[in-house]
Structures are given as structure tokens and as C-alpha cells.
Amino acid sequence: MCRIGSIKCREAVPPSLALRLMLPQQEGHDNSGFALVMQDLEGAFSHYKETPLLSLATTPEGLRLVADHMAALGFVQLAQWVPEVDNRAGLNMAAMPRYVFSNYDWPEVYRYRGQKDREELLLDTRLALRRLLEEHDAGYVYSFWPDVLTLKEIGDPADIAAYFRLWDDDGRLVARNIVAQCRQNTNYGIVRYAAHPFFLQGHTLCANGENTLFTRNREFQQSLHRGYTGFESDSQCLLYTLHYVHRELGWPLTYYKHVLTPLPAAEAAAREDGEVLGLIRESLAQLEINGPNAIIGLLPDGKMLACCDAKKLRPLVIGSGEGDDGDMVAMASEVCALNAILPARDKEKDIYPGERELVVVDNGLELQRWLQ
Amino acid sequence: MAPVKRKAPKEEVPAQAVSVNDLPWLVRHDAGRCVLCGACTAACTFGAIEAKLPPRGASAAEREMRKEAGEGGRPVIVQKAEAAHACTGCGMCEKVCPAGAIRPVRNLDNRWAVLSRTHGEPARRGGRGGRSVVEAPPRERTLDAVVIGRISQMTDPALDSERHTFELRSPLGRLLRPGELPLRVEDGRLVLAGETPPVRWIYPVIFSDMSIGALSTRAWEALALAVAWLNEECHLPVRMSSGEGGVPTRLLESERLKYFILQIASGHFGWNRIIESLPRMKADPAAVLIKVGQGAKPGDGGLLPAAKVAPHIQAIRGVPGATLHSPPNHQGLYSIEEAVQKMHLSMNAAFGFRVPVAVKCAASATSVAVYNNLLRDPYHICGGFFLDGMLGGTGAAYSVSLEHTGHPVVSVVRDCYRAAAGQGLQGRIPLWAGGGIGMNGDAAADAFKLVCLGADGVVLGRLLLQLLGCVGNEHGRCNACNTGHCPAGICTQDPRLVRRLDVDAGAQAIVDYMRAFDAELRKLLAPVGNSALPVGRADALVATRKDVADRLGIAYAC
Ligand code: SF4
Ligand code: SF4
């Protein structure tokens, strides 16, 4: 089983903090990979928060293909951050030749287009790049969105961090929201796209567990939205459902839980809003999950959420720290992770989300616990 | 002493005459054990046997001596060598014989396939697939080559079937796509802002449409009683389709109408009474089912021989006693669009849009096209698509239709589901599958597999008759539902035969089976770790035959 974690902080923090959160959970992963999504960036990216940022792991050929494609679409590159990697021998890591994080200015025609149009453009561009890189077996594109950076690699998380010099804390790579995963590879082939966290139009999600209704979820989602693609991991469905409920249907966030794990019919019927809940369940039965899952999500506006499936078999804990602990909220699969980065927090206040609970952390670090 | 007249042995060989050995069943009678009670001849509804004094091989003098001594002959039970009185193997004689002196045995050397058509009339029998007379190897069922292969035991623990709460409910009615839901956000909550089509969440089993004319009134009553009991005492919301024969007024005007699906077929039998009862109805029916066709003798209409139509049935149906044939199709229909229109009208006129209207068709090579048509119908009318496979059917039909027309249901259900899934429309029109479900007695396993392949629920028919005591089988035993002589009193209106069926015991058998079914379904859900019906979860199945795996799009395992 993978281990997952996230940090939401008032001040931007380096990824080394996320590593310190993840590494104590060592027995829950097998050093087969590490991935993180950072949102609300400072440091090297602080001047480009409004412009889309492309995260790539690629070959030199892939880089050329991407550059040509982006130019053809009218995207103008504004900045690029190429991590200065530590190539020393002995690191347990399968590196790609090039890692590139580039900020682009909007194409001319999109300068005056609305937000919605721009968001569709970003998605279409990422999907097209993905196809392009796949065709040439030339690399991976993880996210293309303003103020969001994704890094994924195969290998030992500590070594991956050493390779990218994440332990250096040089202040260039810092963010207020970080979602991270250390992998346990249960499949024989390692697919980079299968590593959490997954990203789609500002929505980030990672999960620990197994989605037993994957086939049903996937069959339905495939025709629901062009962005619902890949399905390299059964947990991607959970991201797509979040995106669908929150962005496509525009429903309040709390309904995400109602769609994933509907109340038993008798319980729902006894409620005042039973009819609405019944209709939602009828209509979106294919998006239910029935397997063990602990979920951490991050929304475009920076809100962080946590919930579990109704069987509640995978652990998840949320802790908040103030003052010495740096004004942050952290989520993790195991409590030892919180102890590593929030040693002084009031442990009594730790939250273990229930099977009917959705926890939302807003940008003021206020926690809302919403009971289904 | 006058010479005893003696019939001379025939000189011609009567080659064309029917002999007992031409018939599909031979009655073995052990004269040594027979107590001469006469029960067997009285019980045989087919007049297949009679008591006779057999001629004996003795000299004239010997016979004379016996007569003088007051010794009479001893009668024995013999089988009639007549096609019209062929033994059906029903075994009633065996059941009533106090001495175990009689029983039918299958006759592999029969000439029945030829004999039964000698009067220029196609052979008819009760609705069963399988070779009628010849001992054929059991038909290999697709569902038997499918097993539940994904067991949640490692990363996702299995559930405890005895203690976990399962939700075994299926929809009947049109389900809206998420974008079509009339919902509005108000103060951070979704509120209802419009009407939605009626949907019933019911147990994933419907009792098939066997009409009150095809069955005996007692058999129909036993089914109805079982349904009420299952709903009210066992909390299993099983529904029963009325069949085309109409519904007794008492039931139409009772609260329990809600457990019944009213069927309308091309004969429209019984609908006068239904319409007349409308103003006095206390409850809405569960649904209206428009029958376009059925799995047995598809493309052929239902047939109710005059011999089977008792006066009270005539009254319910609204048609005087005559052999009745529902035309093979609704004669006014020329397209699915029109069928949809018809549903629209019947729904509107009859039940004010409060009752889901579904359609039942024979499984066919064209089923997917029909389903697509209903899925894409802009009026969103159809509330269910019932697919009936070729092993279904109860009524009287021509043997040739029963054995050589139709389409197995499993691949059609899968194809329909996949066609819908390809468009993101799965689950919009519930799929119900019938036709041979539970043929081997394991209806729960069949249901579970069909659900995983895409059905929302299953329809049981013949299994219910078996629970009522039907002795027919797929190898030509009995299958005389067309004759009006049903030895179990299930599909006859003959008052003497109907009395053979104990309504309460029949209902009890069905209730008991359904309770077992429920426990068994949980036993199958628990290992795959699902607490609700895994509709479309084909990844839970594997096929032990490669061809079946490929056809159904599931994994092959050996
Ligand atoms: S088995 Fe049935 S049909 Fe045959 S003789 Fe006995 S009672 Fe009659
Ligand atoms: S027992 Fe009755 S219902 Fe069963 S096959 Fe014979 S005639 Fe038909």
C-alpha cells in the first residue's frame, strides 16, 4: 500500500518538509517511487503565479517536440526552471534525461478570453502533449496550470530527493500546499502516470487503497469528459469524480462524499433531503466506490480535503500545528508522520476522519468537519 | 361343450400402427406387487394407462376348468398404444401407487418426433427448451462457464455475509443523467427544482409474467400470496408481473396492487377491467410492462387453448371461451419510436406519470439496436428494458418454435450494457434479464453473474412453477402445459386438477426459496467485497472457457 501525506501552511515551505512527513511511514512503501504536487508557489516561481506552468520529465527529443508544439499553439515561454540534479552514482532512482518546469504566457488569442476558455485550453494542451510524448516514447507531462508544479519519479524517495537536491532547502522551490505520495508498487510494470497525486484542471488528489469498483467507475468516466483518461491507476477515478462533482456539475463540495459513498437507502430516505440524495445516488451510481480508500484532495482555490470510503479500512490522520510548528495543517496515512513534522501539536486534537466524514481545510487553516 | 371362439392371430403385419415402444415414455407395471387399487389410472391426467384383463396363454380346456373352479382373470395395468394418450413421464401414477408397482421410464427408441406431427398439426407442448424427447446431453449453459473469480481477501477484505448490511435493490424506471437532474444550489445545498420520472427500487428479482389464464387460478394465487408475504413479512420487495391475462378486480382495488406489474401485450387481455378499476385503485401498480415478445417462441404470439379457458378466466380476460392467440406483435406498431409513443400514452392516460413503464422483448440479434433506440429517445420515456432469452417461457407453444427460435440472453445483456457504457448511458434504462435463470436450481448464482455482466436484475418464471410442483423438465418430461391436463394443477383450469395444488404450500415453497436466494446472493456479494449490487462489475467474473471469455469481455481463467 502506498503512503500519502499533505501539508498546508501559512508560509511557503520546501519539499524537504514533505519528505520528512513521508519517510517515517517507510514500512508502508517499498521505495518504488515518490511524487508531489506543489501549489501556491513562491521562490523561483513567485513572479509567474498567473501564468501556466508546465511540468515535464522528458528526453531531449521530447523537449524539442514540446517546444515546437507550444510555439505552434502560440504559447510564449516566460521562464524555465531546470533543477540542477545531483548525478552521483549509487542513487536508487530511474531518472529521465530532462526535467523542465516552464512558465508560459497565454497565446495572443487567449489574452482576452474568459477563465473557463483558458482552463479548457490548458487541459487540451496537456492532453495533446501527452499524446505527442507517448507517440514518440519521449517522456511525461504531469500538469499544466498556473501556480502548480508536479514532480514524479521512480525509485527511493530519499534518493529522489537527493537527486533533485530537495534536501538543500535553497529557497527556490517552496509552496503553501504540498500533496505527496511514497509508492508501493503493486503492479509489475511501473508506469509514471500511475503515481499519485493526480492532477486535472486545478484539482489534485492522491489516495491510499484500492478502488474495487474501478471498472464501473472507469467505464462511466470514459465517456463523461475528455480529461478523464489514462486510468493507469484505479485511484485516478477518485480525482475524476471530484472534478466532475465540483467543477462540471458545480455542486457544493460536500456532495463529493455523497457521490463516492452514498448513505444506505434507508438512512437517506429518513432525511429531509432524502429525495435529492436518492436522485444523486440513482444518477451517479457508477461513481460510487466500495473499496478501501483514504483520500487527500486539493482544490484550485487552495482548499484541502480529506475523506475515506465507507468501509474505513485505510488510515488517515489530520493534525494542526501553530507557533513553533509553523502554522500548518498536515495530513498523513500514519500518525508517526505528523509526529515528525508537528512534534509540538496538541495530539488530542488530531482528527481521524470517520467513514461518513469530510474534512476541509480552508486557506485560513480553519478545519471544517462535515458529517454526511 | 361348444368350442371356445378364438381370435385368429393377425396375418398382416400392422407396420403403421403405433406401438407402445413408439412413445416417449414406457409405463412399467409390476403385476406381482399391484394391489389393484386403481389409484394410478385415476391419477393419470393423460389417460395413458388402463386396467385390462390380458389374454392368457392357456388351452381352451384349461380355461374352462378354471372357470368352473370360479377363478376369474386378474387385471393388469397396461399402457395405451395411442399417440393421443402418450405417457408424459409425469410420474403421478408412481406418486399415488401404495405398492410401488408402477413408474414411467424414458424410452430412447421412441418415434415421437415423427408421430407427434401425424395429423398435419405442428407438435405443441409446454414452454421448455431442450430436445423434447430424445435423451440429449444437457444444454451447456454459458453461465456455468462463468465463475466469480475476483475474491476480495487480500487488499480489500471480504465482507461478512451474515453481519454486514447489504443493499440489494435495483431500479425499475427511467434514471436521469447527472446533468439532467432538476437540482439547484441553495445555501450550499442542493434542492429539488422540478419533476423526475418515477423510479422504484425493488428486489433484483421479478416474478415473470405468467398470466392467470396460462396458470391455474390457484397457481397464480400462490405466486401472488408469496409476493405479498415476501414484501410484508420478509422485507424483500419482490415484484410480480401479472402476465397478459388480466388481474382479479379484488387485487386491482387492494393496497397490494403496489407489488404488481401490470402487463399489456398485443392481445390487451384484461385491460378493460384494469381501466374500469382505475377510479377505485388505492395504490399505484409497481410498473406497467409492455410485452412486445417473449423468450420462448419469440416472434410468435401467446396461445391459450380453449380447453384451458374456464368461465371465471374468460371474465377476467374479457374474451369469451375460444382459443386465443396474442398476435406476435402489437399490430399497431411499426417502430420502436411508436412503441415509445405508446408507452407515453399509456402512462399519461392510465397513471398520470406516477408509474414507470417498461418494455419486454425477446432477446434477439437486434436487441442492442432496440436498446440504443430507447436510450436515445428524446422523451426519456422507457423505464426498463426486459430481455427474455430463449430458455424462458411457460405457456403452450409449438415444439419447433421452442427448440429452434430465440436467442440466449447472456451475451445480449452484456452487449446492451456495453453499448450503453460506450455512450456513458449505462444505468439510464434498467436492464432486466430472464430466460433460464435458475435452471439448475442456483438462481442466485445466475442472478449475480448476470448483474456483473450488466443486468440490474433478473426475472424468474419456470423456477417458480417448479417450486409449485411442476415436474416437467428439459428432457421432455411432462411438458404438457398446452393440454389442460397439467398433473400438478399448475397450468390447467380443470377444477379437479386445480385442487391438486395446495396454494399455501406452494406459496410457502416460493417464499422459502426466495429467503434462501437472498442469503445466497449475500454469500456471493461478500467475497467480492461489495455491499450493493455490482452492476456491470464484470471484472469480478472469469470464464473457464476461452470463447465465453472473449465473447463477454471478461478474463479467461483455467
Ligand atoms: S407417468 Fe404420468 S402420464 Fe405416465 S402413466 Fe403415470 S400418471 Fe400417466
Ligand atoms: S407439471 Fe404442469 S406445468 Fe409442469 S410441465 Fe407438466 S403440465 Fe406443465
Image: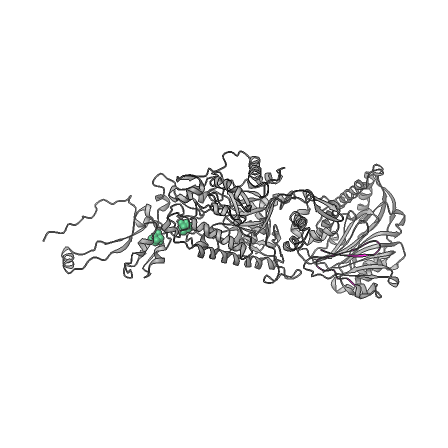
Quadrant of the rendered structure where residue B119 is?
top left
Q: Report if residue B503 is visible in the image.
A: yes
Q: Which residues are magenta?
A: A350-372
- Quick check: can you spot residue A87? no
Provide residue A362's location: percent of width, then percent of height: 81, 54
Residue in front for this viewpoint, A279 or A245:
A279
Along the line of sight, which residue is nearer the eye, B217 or B85? B217
Q: What x and y, as percent, mark residue A349?
A: 80, 64
A109 over A323 or under it: above or below: above
Picture quarter with the C terminus of chain B: bottom right
User: Is A360 covered by the magenta stretch?
Assistant: yes
Is A12 on the left-hand or right-hand side of B384?
right
Residue B308 colored in magenta in the image: no
Relative to the observer, which residue lies in front, A79 or B4? Answer: B4
- Residue placed farthest to the left in the image? B1
**Location of residue A156 in the rendering, given as x and y in whole percent from the top left corner:** 78, 60
Question: Is residue B475 placed above or below B346 in the rendered structure?
Answer: below
User: Which color scheme does this rendered protein use?
Assistant: one colour
Q: How many numbered marks does the figure carry?
A: 0
Q: Position of residue A64 (x, y in %)?
A: 82, 44
Name the side, left or right, on which A97 lies relative to B446: right
